[in-house]
Amino acid sequence: MGFRIVLLGPPGSGKGTQAEKLNDDLGLIRLSTGDMLREAVRDQTELGKMAKQYMDKGALVPDDVVIGLIEEKLVSIREGFVLDGFPRTVQQADALGKLVSINRVVNLDVDDDELVSRLTKRRSCPNCNVVFHLLYKPPMKDGVCDKCGAALYQRSDDAEDTVRERLNVYRKNTFPLIEYYSKQGILVNIEGKGSINEIYEAIEASL
Ligand code: AP5
């Protein structure tokens, strides 16, 4: 088994962007609980209908639900992987620790004003989950995904009020994981402000 990495950081810190690069360059399988949940919402499954009520408010989906989702994926993975958006609570981190050993937790550190500006100008692909930014990473053709050609959309939880609520939820529930993994000696802090490539190089150097 290769690298087993967790990307930690507030909403908009670049977890999805860097997970995609780790997938492209190192072939690590990208596991994003946010993408899994949005897919369930789009397919209008029972899970999706339930999760939507939390996601629309910027709240976390209950631990047992997301732990179940990740457990299902991890049992079949033999290669290296990168977790984007999981774990987000101490309970989720405890559950992950029982499933697999993680070699590195990368914490992306970005200030709130930058996060709000990134998220309100983000555009996402509903098909392959690649993310763009209207200024920092614009698609080659307006409104169209470079990778698969699907029409880009703006996530409903990227409205400014919901972004602020997601930041509050992050501080309360997820921020304590920095200390949690620091104590295990596997956490590295990376300054998340800078170009996407500079941050990627810092992550690669830390592995
Ligand atoms: P999720 O989809 O995981 O959202 P998030 O953690 O809030 O993170 P984001 O996807 O918003 O940001 P990101 O850090 O990936 O940044 P990105 O690379 O896109 O979760 C959504 C919801 O699902 C949650 O609110 C919750 O309800 C539920 N959920 C998911 N997982 C859960 C869990 N484990 N437990 C419970 N509930 C869960 O970048 C953002 C923008 O910035 C993009 O436009 C990008 O192009 C741009 N950008 C990236 N890097 C840079 C850079 N260096 N410079 C300039 N711009 C940049």
Image: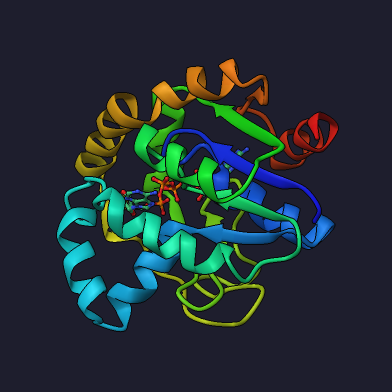
**Left/right of residue 32 with respect to residue 82 in the rendered view:** left
**Left/right of residue 44 with respect to residue 136 in the rendered view:** left
**Left/right of residue 46 with respect to residue 38 in the rendered view:** left
Q: Residue at x 36, y 68 (%)?
A: 38
Rendered location of residue 110, percent (x, y): 51, 25
Front position in the image: 92 or 149: 92
Instruction: Specify the quadrant that holds the C terminus.
Output: top right
Q: Residue at x 72, y 37 (%)?
A: 103
Rendered location of residue 50, percent (x, y): 17, 67
**Left/right of residue 158 with respect to residue 182 in the rendered view:** left
Rendered location of residue 74, percent (x, y): 57, 62
Rendered location of residue 132, percent (x, y): 55, 57
In this rendering, the count of numbered labels is: 0
Give the colour scheme shown: rainbow
Q: Residue at x 41, y 45 (%)?
A: 119
Q: Residue at x 66, y 57 (%)?
A: 20
Instruction: Specify the quadrant that holds the N terminus.
Output: bottom right
- In the rendered image, the residue lying farthest to the front is 98
Front position in the image: 170 or 65: 65
Q: Identify whether 83 is placed above or below 108.
A: below
